[in-house]
Image: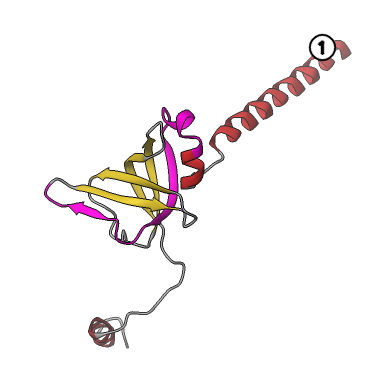
Amino acid sequence: MRKGIKNRWIVAGFVLVGAITGLSFVSMDKNSVYFYTPSEAKAGAAELSSDLIKVGGMVMPGSVTWKPENLSLSFTLTDLKGTDIRVNFTGTPPDMFKEGQGVVCEGTIAPDGTGIIARHLLVKHSEEYKPPHGEGASKEKELLEKSLFKE
């Protein structure tokens, strides 16, 4: 292969790698935020109202309204710094959903930042394992002791 053709291939390779790297950084910049806090979401609500976003915070105690007949759930999401957003969700809430629990809501925010129509709820849970207590624990222990796998 001639030296001029070889140099062209090397230059083309560098241009291709540079273009791929540049496009990667541009796409990561837009998608790098996993979720917004309520204060960030409210501050940017006008720009974010046309996008599907994730907003994370705590479910404010005393704010949950659940109507099982039409699977309607509404609650207030707070960042515990004074910023609250009302969330409306239609569907069955996750099993671990409760007041005072961390939750990430995926949906659309109103242009004025006062509310979110959520499509999905992701519940955060504690990383701490606690063994079962109470009467259920003794039954589980008894079942384990009678297990066929135990020698």
Q: Quick check: 97 above or below 54?
A: below
Check residue 135 for magenta coloring. Answer: no
**In terms of image quadrants, where is residue 117?**
top left
**Which percent across, then down, holds residue 47?**
48, 29
Give the residue number, with chain letter if any, for mark 1.
5
Q: Residue at x 28, y 85 (%)?
A: 141
Amino acid type at circle 1 is Ile
60 left or right of 67? right
**Which percent across, then down, holds residue 5?**
82, 12
Check the picture and name the quadrant holding the N terminus: top right
Check the picture and name the quadrant holding the C terminus: bottom left
- Residue furthest toward the front? 82
Residue situated in front as seen by the camera: 142 or 138: 138
**In terms of image quadrants, where is residue 144?**
bottom left
**Which percent across, then down, holds residue 128?**
45, 72
**Which percent across, then down, holds residue 28?**
59, 35
Bounds of the magenta segment: 43-69
